[in-house]
Image (cartoon, grey):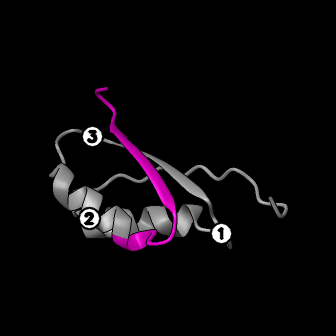
Amino acid sequence: MSGQSIKIGQVRGIDIAEVVQAFHAEVVQPDIEVVIFFCAREYNLEVMADAIRKAFPDTAVVGCTSSG
């Protein structure tokens, strides 16, 4: 690791594109290696997963709903 820190982001909203964009802005850093992402199960999870993959294209992403 090159001096990176763990960043934590928390975003609330209804529009998935806006939520992912705001989350990305809070946690992005150079050479990011992994994103761990939790979201409410009320979101369309396929759309959310696609938006997260597009926001972090070269990054490993682990996701889960807040319901488990």
Give the mark nearer the N terminus: 2 vs 1. Answer: 1
Label 1 neighbourhood size at 10 Å, few (<14), some (14-19), many (20+)? few
Residue 29 is tagged as 1
Give the mark nearer the N terminus: 1 vs 3. Answer: 1
User: Could you tell me how far apart the alpha carbons at marks 2 and 1 are, in whole angstroms?
Assistant: 20 Å
Residue under the point 22% across and 63% down = 15
Q: Which residues are magenta?
A: 54-68
Specify whether residue 39 is painted magenta: no
The reply to whether dot 2 and dot 3 touch (C-beta < 8 Å) is no
Q: Secondary structure at mark 3?
A: loop
Q: Tell me the residue that label 3 is attached to.
A: 40
Q: Residue 13 placed where, x, y %? A: 29, 56
When asked about the image quadrant of residue 50, the answer is bottom left
7 or 50: nearer the viewer: 50
Residue under the point 19% across and 61% down = 47
The amino acid type found where label 2 is placed reads Asp
The reply to whether dot 2 and dot 1 touch (C-beta < 8 Å) is no
Q: Nearer the viewer, mark 2 or mark 1?
A: 2
User: Could you tell me how far apart the alpha carbons at marks 1 and 3 are, in whole angstroms?
Assistant: 24 Å
Q: Nearer the viewer, mark 1 or mark 3?
A: 1
Q: Residue 37 placed where, x, y %? A: 43, 47
Q: Secondary structure at mark 2?
A: helix
Give the mark nearer the N terminus: 2 vs 3. Answer: 3
Q: Secondary structure at mark 1?
A: loop
Label 3 neighbourhood size at 10 Å, few (<14), some (14-19), many (20+)? few
Specify whether residue 57 is painted magenta: yes
Q: Tell me the residue that label 2 is attached to.
A: 50
User: Could you tell me how far apart the alpha carbons at marks 2 and 3 are, in whole angstroms?
Assistant: 15 Å
Residue 19 is tagged as none
The amino acid type found where label 1 is placed reads Gln
Q: Tell me the quarter of the image containing the N terminus.
A: bottom right
Residue at the farthest right position: 3
